[in-house]
Amino acid sequence: MPELPEVETVRRGLAPVMEGARLVEVVARRPDLRWPLPERFAERLTGRRVAGLGRRAKYLVADIEAANGRPAEALVMHLGMSGSFRIDMPATEPHAPGAFALPRSKAAAHDHVEFGFESGARIVYNDPRRFGAMLLVPRNELEEHPLFRDLGPEPLGNAFDAATLAAACAGRRSPIKAVLLDQTVVAGLGNIYVCEALHRAGIAPDRMAASLIGAIGQSDGGVAPIIHPTAPLDRLVAIIREVLEEAIRAGGSTLRDHAQVDGTLGYFQHTFRAYGRAGEPCLTPGCGGVIERLVQSGRSTFHCTSCQK
DNA sequence: CAAAGTTCCTGCGAGC
DNA sequence: TGCTCGCAGGAACTTT
């Protein structure tokens, strides 16, 4: 489930439970996900308060308040391919202060980590394939952490624009799809939304990225670039934003058995025009083509050869 | 069989 | 010609 819109949807679902809440029990049912869990993971979190829950690229970042002189830490969480969170609310009244006999939720298969809060709410991380990860990083070192250091701009932020994308495409020998999937170019896109954005933009996924730069704008004597509003990369940037915003509004995409934190389904997958639609008619008005599947760098690409050039 | 993600390794091409 | 260096593509991780 997890590209930027799904992670953002999860963040919005978890935030009301986590923000300002104190952890009273942390259960790690196995020592590792993709990587080993941090040393003394449960001990370092138990008793601490979560100040806020943010997102960077496809990472959730929970701010853990300092306690007992320990430095403030960031609990970094990644959902990998199959990770999901669910919230188990207490069936009964919140227990009295000091009474820590929390009703532990019934652990389902692949429930690997569980966070219990003072309120009685419990947040459970489930991840069959275990490509997800949890890390504890000193808050002031987060930006320099290897996982964050090289991340490109947020696609919904101001730092991502046609000029930035053009710079990334320049001198590259790879197709535009590979560039958009590169998290150091723009952080948060994945296979689904790249396919969708390129389809909407009418750009072939296997087109060389560098070939899109030409029409970006001419230099006005080398002083400042003039960006044509209709230039392909300008349009692509606008469409990427549009697709991501639509998807977030729809609660993300629910593939396979995945659901949002409250168990409801995301609806964006019903809006897919390319992803997963091989053999079905292209939905671009007046196109009449058929969506085809091709493999790029070992990953499926869905596209229409009629309207994507 | 194929799967939403990322890291690591190999192999190739460019350039010195 | 030969050897680096860096990039680009593929394998690998795992379970359903």
Image (cartoon, coloured by chain):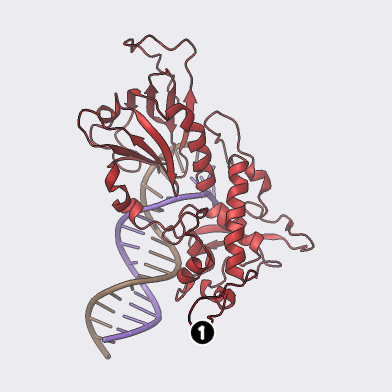
Chain colours: A red, B purple, C brown
Left or right of A85 in this view: A62? left
From the viewer's perspective, is residue A21 above or below residue A274?
A: above
Judge from the rendering whether residue A309 lies leftward or rightward of residue A185; answer left or right: right
Height in image: A169 above or below A32? Answer: below
Q: Position of residue A212 (x, y in %)?
A: 56, 73
Side (left or right) of B7 relative to A56 = left
> How packed is label 1: few (under 14 Cα within 10 Å), some, or many (20 or more)?
few
Q: Is residue A182 left or right of residue A199?
A: left
Nearest to the observer: residue A148 or residue A128: A148
Say which of A307 and A19 sits in front: A19
Q: Which residue is mark 1?
A: A221
Residue A305: x percent and y percent? 67, 67
Q: What's the chain of the residue with tag 1?
A: A
In the foreground, A112 or A42: A42
**Front in this rendered view, residue A144 or A28:** A144
What residue is shown at x 71% (from left), y 67% (from top)? A306
- Which amino acid type is marked by label 1? Gly
Q: Which secondary structure lies at badge 1?
A: loop
Where residue A160 appears, as percent x and y from the top left, is: 49, 60
Write down the quadrant of residue A20 in the picture.
Answer: top left
- What residue occupies the far right of the structure in this picture? A286
Residue appearing at x 43%, y 57% in the figure: A183
Q: Is residue A109 visible?
A: no
Residue A204, how many percent across, how many down? 61, 67
- Kindly give the residue lying farthest to the left in the view shown: A69
Quadrant the C terminus of chain A occupies: bottom right
